[in-house]
Image (cartoon, coloured by chain):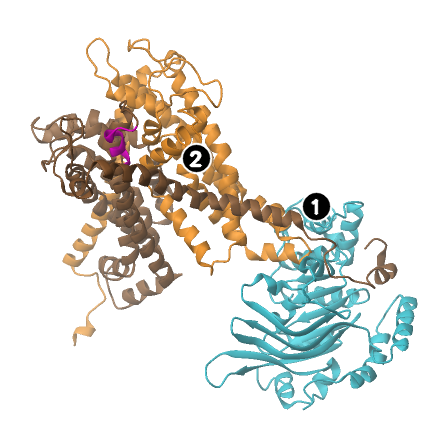
Amino acid sequence: MAEHVTEPEDKQREAAPAGGVGIPDQGARFSRDGETEAEPRRPREAIFQLEKVVVSYGPKPAVRDVTFDVGRNEITALIGPSGCGKSTLIRCLNRMNDLIPGARVEGRVLYHGEDLYAPNVDAVEVRKRIGMVFQKPNPFPKSIYDNIAFGPRVLGRKQNLDETVERALTQAALWDEVKDRLKTNAFGMSGGQQQRLCIARCLAVNPDVILMDEPCSALDPISTGKIEDLMMELKREYSIVIVTHNMQQAARVSDKTAFFTVELASDDDHRTGRVVEFDDTEKIFTNPADSRTEAYVTGKVG
Amino acid sequence: MSAHGGAIGKAPASQRAKDTGFRLTMLACLGLSVGLLALLLYDVVKDGASHLTMDFLTSFGSISADKAGAEAAIWGTIWIMVVCAAFIVPVGVATAIYLEEYADHSRWWNRLIEVNIQNLASVPSIVYGILGLAFLVRGPLSLGPVVLAGGLCLGLLVLPVVIIASREAIRAVPPSIREGSLALGATQWQTIRRQVLPASIPGIATGVILALSRAIGETAPLIVIGAATVIAFNPEGLDSRFTALPIQIFDWISRASNDVNNYKPLAAAAILFLMILLLLMNSVAIWLRNRYEQKW
Amino acid sequence: MEAGSTTAAGARAVPSLGAARRRYGEDVVKGILILATFLSILTTTGIVVALLVPTIEFFGDVGVWEFLSGSKWTPLFEPPSFGVLPLLVGTLLTTGIAMLVATPLGLGAAIYLSEYARPRVRKTIKPALEILAGVPTIVFGYFALTFFTPEILRGLFNADVNIFNVLAAGIVMGFMIVPTVASVAEDAMSAVPQSLREGAFGLGASKLSVSLRVVFPAALSGIVAAIVLGVSRAIGETMIVLIAAGQIASNSIDPREPHYSLASFIGATAKGDVPTGSTEYKTIFAVGMLLFVLTLVMNLISIRFVRKYRQVYE
C-alpha cells in the first residue's frame, strides 16, 4: 500500500533538507524555488519522473512497477539485493538499454517532463545530457588528456579544449595528481584514479545528470571514500543517480533512496525486480514503511 | 593390510612406459611436420641459392636458362598485391564492422552471411579463378587478363581471411569501451571510428598481411584467368598484361629441362625469393601483433 | 560547461531531446557497410552463376548421366568421351593418401600442443606450423616433384615409380594439410573445460587416458570438423597434383602412376589454349561445378561440427 511515495508527502519532506545542503549558488537556487512556487504541484524540481516503468529483456520483465522522481541537485540511491534490476533500471535512464537486442521499456520515463522514449527522441541527444559512470572503470586506451577531450571532440566543442580538460579534472579532484602526465596512457593509473577519470570524462561534456552504476564496486575503501566525497561536491551542480550494493554508501551520500526487491515467479525461476519503497534516505534507513525494506537495511536478509 | 595401505610410489613401469611412448608419439607427429618444413626449405635453398643473384632479379625471362630472370614476375606480383590490398582493406574491414557492430545475429540473413563467408574461406582457389575468368576477364567486366583482374580475383579469394581476422580484432575490443563512448553522447559511427577501429588496427593489420601472404603464393586462379607466362616487360598500369612469381615458377617447373637449359634451379631461386618475401611479411605481422596489441 | 555552474543551470533549462536533424551520415555509413557485406553474397552468387551457365550448356552436349558415370575421360579424342569417373578416382586417391598422412599427424600434433606442450614450447611451435600452413602450394608441388619422388619414393621403391605419381602428390599434400587439421583440432581440445580433465586426474587417470578417453571424445565434433575441413582442402588443391601427379586421366588405382584430379584437370585445361565455347572449354566449368559442390558439402559439414562444440563449451 505504501509502496510508492506520493507527491505531496514528497514535497513536504523534501523542502528543508535539499535546500539546505551546501548549495553555493543561492541565487540560482532561490530563483528556481521561485519557479516552483508558480507551479505548486511540483515544489521539488524533478529531473526524472518514472511512472510504472517496466523493463524487459525478451518476453519476461526484468524490473517492473518503478515509480519515483529524481530531484535536481540530489543524490538518489537505488539499493536492493543482486538481480533486482537496479542496473537494468539505471541503464534505461540514458537509453543505454537500446544497445541490448530485445530490451523493451514500458511505462513512462519523463526527463524534464519530456518522454525519454518518445519516437522523436534521439538516444544520442539523451546521452549528451545524461552521463554515465560504470561499474568497472573503463578508460579508453588513450592518454589521460584524450580520454577527457574525447567527449567534447565528438560533440564538436573543440574550442578551449585545454581549459575544459583542466576544469573537468579539477572537478573530479584529479587535476593535481595527473597534471604532469596528461599525455601518458590512462591504463597506467590506479583503479580509483581511473574511475575518477571516467567521472571527469563524463563532466567534460557538461551533462545535466550523472548516472553511476555501482561506481565503487571495483575499488578499495580509500578510493571509495574519495569518490563519495566527490559525489557530495558534484551534487551542487549536477543531479546524481547511483546504484549501489553498499548500504552504508547509500546512507552516507544519498538524499533519496529507492529500495528494490526481487520476486521469484511462481511457475518458473524467472526473477523480476520491483520498487518496494522510495523515500528520504534517512527515513528508509531509520524508519522504513515496508517490512522488507527494514529486513534488508538492518541486514536480516540480503 | 589392504590394497589401500600400500605406499604411494611411482605408477607401475608398464603404465609409465605406455605414457612416455604416447607422449613421444604425439611429439613425433609434431616433429615430423616441422621436419618436413625443414627438409623443404633445405631442398629449395640447395637448388636455388646459387641462382638468386641481382642479375636474376633484374632480368626478364629467356629461353636460355643462363640469362633468364624474374623481373617481370616480381613487378607483376607487386602490382597485383597492391591492387589486392587496395581492394581487401576497405571491403574486408567494412564487412567486419557491419557483422560485429550492426548486424542483428538473430536475423536469418545475417547468419546466412556468416556461414557464407566461412564457406568462401574454404572454396578451392581454382574456383575463384573460374569466377574471375567468367566475370572479370570476360563477361560483364571484360577486363582481359590484366593486373586489375588478377588483383581483384586474388582479393575475392582472400577477402574471407581479412573479414574473419578483422572481426576477431573488433570483437576483442571490450563492450565497456563502446558503452563509455556512447554514454558521452558519441554516435555509433563516432564510437566505431574513434574508439573501436583504432584499438583493433593491430589485429586488422595482422589479418591483412596474412591475407596478402596467402594471395602472393596463389597460382591456380592466375592460371585460369590467363596470366601470361612468357612476358618481357613490367606492368605499366592496371590494364597491363602481367605475369607473377608463382606463374613464373610454375612455368619453369613445367618446362622440359635438358643439359643445356636446366630451368629447375631458376624455379628454386624464384621460390626462395618468394619464401623470403613471405617470411618478411609474417615477421612484420608477428611484430605488429606483439608490439601494438592492446592488453585489456 | 561554457561558463561554469551558475549559467550552466540556465543552459540546461530547456532540453530538447529530438535530434536537431536526422543523422544522415550515420545512415550513409551503415549503407556503405551493408554494400560491402553484400559483396560476399555476390561472390557466392557469382561463383554459382559462372559455373552453372556453361555447365548447363555442357549438359546440352553431353548427357548428365554420361558425365557422372562414364569411365572414360578423353575430351580430345575423336569421338570424345566425357566420363568424369577417372578424374574422381584421381581426386579420391590423392585426397585419401593426403588424409592418411594429415589425420594422424595433425591430431597427434594437436594432442601434444593442447595436452603436453608447456606454454613456451607452444609459443615457438605454433608459429612454425603457421609457416608450414603459409607455404604456397606451388612450393609443395616443386618439392614433391624434384625431391620427394626422386630422392625418397624412388629410394623406397627401387625406381619403380613414375616421375609423376599420385603417391608423392598425396603425401606432400598431407603435410600441407597438417596445420589446418592441427589448428582446428587444437582449438576444440583447448575448449574442453579444465574441470573435465581434473575430474579424471582426480580419479587417478594417467595423462594418456585423460587425453584419449576424456579430451578426445569431448572434442570429437571439433576433431571431425578438422578432418572434414582437411578433406575439403585436399579435394580442392590444384597445384601440387598438377605438378607432381602428371596429366593423365586413367582408371588405375596404382598410386605409383600419374593421375589427373578434378582440380588439376581444370588447371591444365585452362592453361592450354582451349577455344572458347567449345565443349572442351565447357568441361572446365562442368568439372568446376562438381568440385564446388563437393567442397561445399564438406565445408558445410565442417561448419556445422564447429558450431556444435562451440555451443557446448562456449
Element at label 2? helix
Q: Quadrant of residue C135?
A: top left
Name the quarter where the N terminus of chain C is drawn: bottom right
Chain assigned brown = C
Residue A151 placement (x, y as % from top left): 71, 52
Image-based side of B22 in relation to C35, left or right: left
Where is A94 relative to C128, above or below? below
Chain assigned cyan = A
Q: CA distance from mark 2 to mark 1?
A: 44 Å
Image-based side of A69 in relation to C62, left or right: right
Chain B painted colour: orange
Q: Dot 2 corresponds to which residue?
A: B155
C272 vs B283, nearest the viewer: C272
Residue A132 placement (x, y as % from top left): 68, 62
Circle 1 marks a residue in which chain?
A
A283 vs B60, nearest the viewer: B60
- Looking at the rendering, the stretch of residues picked out in magenta corresponds to C277-285
Q: Which residue is depicted at the point 46% across and 27% down? A: B148
